Amino acid sequence: MTSVSPRLSFSEGMRAAAEMRRRRKALGLSQTALGVKLGTSKTWVAFRERGSVRMREGDAARIATALGTDLAGLTKAEIA
């Protein structure tokens, strides 16, 4: 049986979404390119950047790694 990671709190998820977008753009990556790095789609990335889907901890950790940070770096960012 596969274990599912818990979802981030609403505020952590919103901070992670904003930081995800900021870091992706700073690295010059498109949503499609980030999706390829993560083994997923542009739509998957876009939904998480908009906060349309509450992020799971495991997904946030994968995103953070792909963007050169850790989970804390993604979720503790200040929302501008």
Image (cartoon, helix red, strand yellow):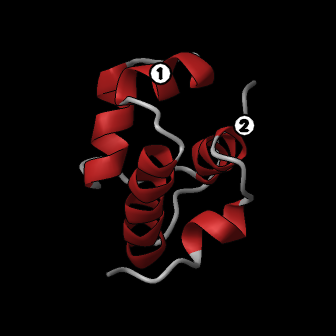
Q: Name the image quarter holding residue 66.
A: top right
Q: x%, y% of residue 15? A: 43, 71
Task: In this rendered view, identify the residue nearer to me: 54 or 1.
Answer: 54
- Does residue 10 lie above or below 4 as drawn? below
Q: CA separation, marks 1 and 2?
A: 28 Å
Callout 1 touching callout 2 (CB < 8 Å): no
Question: Would residue 19 appear left or right of 18 to someone viewing this image?
Answer: right
Q: Secondary structure at mark 1?
A: helix
Place of residue 38 in the rendered image (x, y in percent of width and height, measured from the top left):
59, 25
Query: What residue is drawn where x is 72% and y is 37%?
Result: 3
Residue placed most toward the observer, 52 or 33: 33
Residue at 37% over, 30% down: 31
Which mark's residue is nearer the viewer, 1 or 2? 1
Which residue is more in the foreground, 63 or 3? Answer: 63
Q: Which mark is residue 33?
A: 1
SS at badge 2: loop
Residue type, numbered disc 2: Ser
Q: Earlier in the sequence, mark 1 or mark 2?
A: 2
Image quadrant where residue 41 sits = top left
Q: Residue at x 39, y 34 (%)?
A: 45
Disc 2 target residue? 3
Q: Position of residue 7 (x, y in %)?
A: 52, 57
Q: Residues within 10 Å of mark 2 (few under 14, many from 20)?
A: few
Q: Amino acid at mark 1?
A: Ala
Mark 1 neighbour class, 10 Å CA radius: few under 14, some 14 to 19, many 20 or more: some
Q: Is residue 43 above or below residue 78?
A: above
- The disc placed on residue 70 is none
Quarter occupied by the N terminus: top right
> In the displayed structure, does residue 26 sit left or right of residue 2?
left
